[in-house]
Amino acid sequence: MSWQFPRVAVLAALLLGAHAAASGATPDFSGTWERYPDPYGPERFPEDPPPPAGGPTLKEPYATEYRKLNQRKAEGMKKGKPVADPSTQCLPEGMPTIMAAVYPIELLQTSREIVVLAEFLTQTRRIYLNEKMPAVEDISPGYNGYSVGRWQGDTLVVETIGLREDVKFMGIPRSAQMKVTERLRLTGPGLLENQITIDDPTVLAKPYQFTFGYKRNPEYRIMEYICDNNRNRFDAEGGVSLEVAPK
Amino acid sequence: MEDFHQKPVSLHMRYTRLASALVVTLFLACPVLAHHSFAMFDKNKVVTVKGVVSKIEWTNPHVFIFLDAPDGKGGKTRYAVECNSPNVLMRTGWKFNTVKAGDPVSIGLYPLRNGQPGGLLDSVTLPNGKTIKG
């Protein structure tokens, strides 16, 4: 009955596989991911996409501050002198902007941490797994803050605090107490979802929630991106113009 | 999104085979959202400039092609042509040496709105006659 062996083995493997899935074997997020669906659409010269999920609900005076910034941006666009923002100056994006993956991101997953490598500006972000979150007073404020993740079934829940107040997501005001919570899970073959919640009771009237989706691209290799030839020049009002003389 | 750089072309389009990619590129949308936004350029107008490449800066955040073109008065005007980032260009089939110093080329550009000689690359016609999008 030797012919039966392979069939039994295949059946056993299938059952074991099903069991592993049902018992919540840790998902593997490792790989290179690009935003999906593409937030920019097919336009050759797309407008800046609006903030996700209709934007935040801000308290005063932050709501007025944010509205004025957006007015200045719109006027700058009309005048042909756009208002400078961090990436115009080759500054890192910080959290949660880095997870918007304007260029692809690579995730490296071990039992102890998940590392996010962003192609844009060659940025690195670390998420420590199953660790105690330090008190915010003990964290040196940074672009990506301090991130701790833990698995809840098939979902990785990541909390991030210790974010610099001046490093903003789409210009949205924030306080030093801001907390970002991400819920990452695989939603289909090669699909990853990141539900993001920003809590900041000082600034936000209610938590700001939105979702970034990603698609795996196993064939793409992240390339270098060192922003060392910035030809943008900034005037006193933060307006940008181009330096046209060659170096 | 203002904080964002130029739009990367979708990686679904995996143009790793460069030879075919240069042809394929002609049919691609190659979005260029400059990280300082498009506002500095006149996106309603494409100006064609013929000249010789004096220098190429294959750098971030933007590749720059400097093009010397006759000014019609016996002299030359140097145009600064902003392109996408090296990574985005490579994803659409460019190589670092697709355009080289000394190359006679024809460039279609969206001119700077402030009147300076320069603009944003729309397309370049290479010495071999091929036209590729920026």
Image: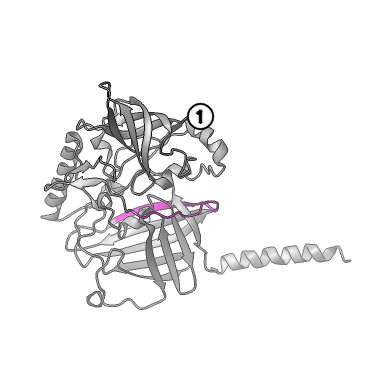
Outermost residue, front side: B74
Parent chain of label 1 = B
* x and y percentages locating residue A108 in the rendered image: 48, 65
* x and y percentages locating residue A212 in the rendered image: 38, 52
A220 within the magenta span: yes
B91 within the magenta span: no
Residue A174 quadrant = bottom left
* x and y percentages locating residue A213 in the rendered image: 42, 51
- Mark yes or no: residue A37 visible: no
Q: Give the amino acid at mark 1.
A: Asn
At x 33%, y 47%, the residue is B5
Residue toward you, B69 or A44: B69
Q: Which residue is mark 1?
A: B128
Outermost residue, top side: B72
Residue B82 quadrant = top left
What stretch of residues is rendered in magenta? A209-226
* x and y percentages locating residue A28 in the rendered image: 52, 64
Colour scheme used in the picture?
one colour
